[in-house]
Image (tube, helix red, strand yellow):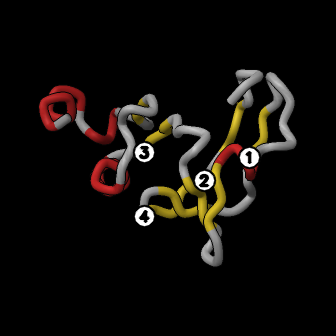
């Protein structure tokens, strides 16, 4: 990541996009300190609102295939407060 930053510079990058393999508390902290980011999380990851945590597939259980939803307030995932959106793209998650 540092080599990438030295080539392009932080200011030239709007945000990084990553798949589910790039999750975890340390990774989220690094990205939030250095970059904007969009990360695909697992439907089994816990999403918190400050009082309780629920699985992503529970929070977005009302979605149908191809439907998109965004939560209006930031939620806690992997120790970070982030905005969460979902696209339901499989029948049997």
Q: Which circle, 3 or 1, is nearer the viewer? A: 1
- Which one is nearer the viewer's eye here, 85 or 55? 55
Going from N to C along the chain, the mark reached first, 3 or 2, is 3
**The disc label shown at residue 45, or none:** none
Residue sitting at 56 percent across and 55 percent down? 46
42 is higher (above) or lower (below) than 4? below
Q: Which residue is mark 1?
A: 70
- Which one is nearer the viewer's eye here, 15 or 77? 77
Number of residues whose C-alpha sits closer than 10 Å to that of mark 3, classed few (under 14), some (14–19) or many (20 or more): few
Residue sitting at 80 percent across and 43 percent down? 61
Q: Which residue is mark 4?
A: 79
Q: Is residue 17 visible?
A: no
63 is higher (above) or lower (below) than 70? above
Residue 51: give x, y in percent of width and height: 64, 77
Residue 19: give x, y in percent of width and height: 44, 29
Q: Which circle, 1 or 4, is nearer the viewer? A: 4
Q: Which circle, 4 or 2, is nearer the viewer? A: 4
Q: State the separation of the CA atoms marked 2 and 1.
A: 8 Å
Please say if the residues under marks 2 and 1 sit with CB atoms less than 8 Å apart.
yes
Number of residues whose C-alpha sits closer than 10 Å to that of mark 1, classed few (under 14), some (14–19) or many (20 or more): few
Please say if the residues under marks 3 and 2 sit with CB atoms less than 8 Å apart.
no
**The disc label shown at residue 36, or none:** 3
Apparent side of residue 49 relative to residue 91 in the rendered image (left or right): left
Residue 66: give x, y in percent of width and height: 80, 23
Q: Which residue is mark 2?
A: 83
User: Based on the displayed image, in which of its 4 quarters is residue 67 positioned?
Assistant: top right
Q: Assign the C terminus to one quadrant of the image.
A: top right
């Amino acid at each position: 990541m540092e080599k990438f930053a030295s080539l392009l510079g932080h200011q030239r990058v709007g945000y990084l996009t990553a798949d589910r393999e790039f999750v975890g508390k340390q990774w989220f902290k690094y990205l939030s300190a250095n970059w904007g980011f969009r990360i695909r999380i697992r439907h089994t990851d816990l999403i918190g609102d400050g009082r309780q945590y629920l699985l992503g597939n529970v929070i977005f259980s009302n979605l149908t295939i191809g439907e998109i939803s965004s939560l209006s307030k930031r939620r806690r995932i992997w120790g970070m407060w982030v905005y969460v959106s979902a696209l339901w793209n499989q029948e049997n998650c």
